[in-house]
């Protein structure tokens, strides 16, 4: 998965990220700041995911979010 999307579109994905993982808070978003590694660490901490599961979940999130962002751009 292209984790650059998380960093490059950080301002656009923060809200979606908090909807997807409700246990994350504003302080967590500041810690993540577009870093897939930090997001994976927090998912492991908050949800008890293994590293592999955290990365799988991030991939799923990015795939769906990228498609959503692409649709929004097409509508403009």
Image: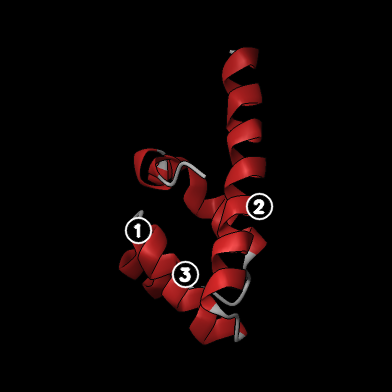
Instruction: Calculate the distance from the C-alpha at mark 2 to the C-alpha at mark 3.
Output: 13 Å
Q: Which mark is residue 35?
A: 1
- Give the percent coordinates (x, y) of residue 64: 67, 42
Q: Residue at x 37, y 68 (%)?
A: 38
Q: Residue at x 62, y 67 (%)?
A: 21
Instruction: Calculate the distance from the C-alpha at mark 1 to the C-alpha at mark 2.
Output: 16 Å
Residue at the extreme front of the image, as rendered = 52
Q: Secondary structure at mark 3?
A: helix
Instruction: Calculate the distance from the C-alpha at mark 3 to the C-alpha at mark 1.
Output: 9 Å
Q: Secondary structure at mark 1?
A: loop
Toward which corner of the image does residue 36 lie, by quadrant?
A: bottom left
Toward which corner of the image does residue 9 lie, by quadrant?
A: top left
- Kindly identify which residue carries mark 3: 40
- Vertical placement of 72 versus 56: above or below? above
- Give the percent coordinates (x, y) of residue 66: 58, 36
Near mark 1 (Cα within 10 A), the count class, few <14, some 14-19 or many ≥20, is some
Q: Which mark is residue 60?
A: 2
For the residues bearing labels 3 and 1, Cβ distance under 8 angstroms: no
Near mark 3 (Cα within 10 A), the count class, few <14, some 14-19 or many ≥20, is many
Q: Which mark is residue 57?
A: none
The earlier-in-sequence mark between 1 and 2 is 1
Q: Quadrant of the C terminus?
A: top right
56 left or right of 27? Answer: right
């Amino acid at each position: 998965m292209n984790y650059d999307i998380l960093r490059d579109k950080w301002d656009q994905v923060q809200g979606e990220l908090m909807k997807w993982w409700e246990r994350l808070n504003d302080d967590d978003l500041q810690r993540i700041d577009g870093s897939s590694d930090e997001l994976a660490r927090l998912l492991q901490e908050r949800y008890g995911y293994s590293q592999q599961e955290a990365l799988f979940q991030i991939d799923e999130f990015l795939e769906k979010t990228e498609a959503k962002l692409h649709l929004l751009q097409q509508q403009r």
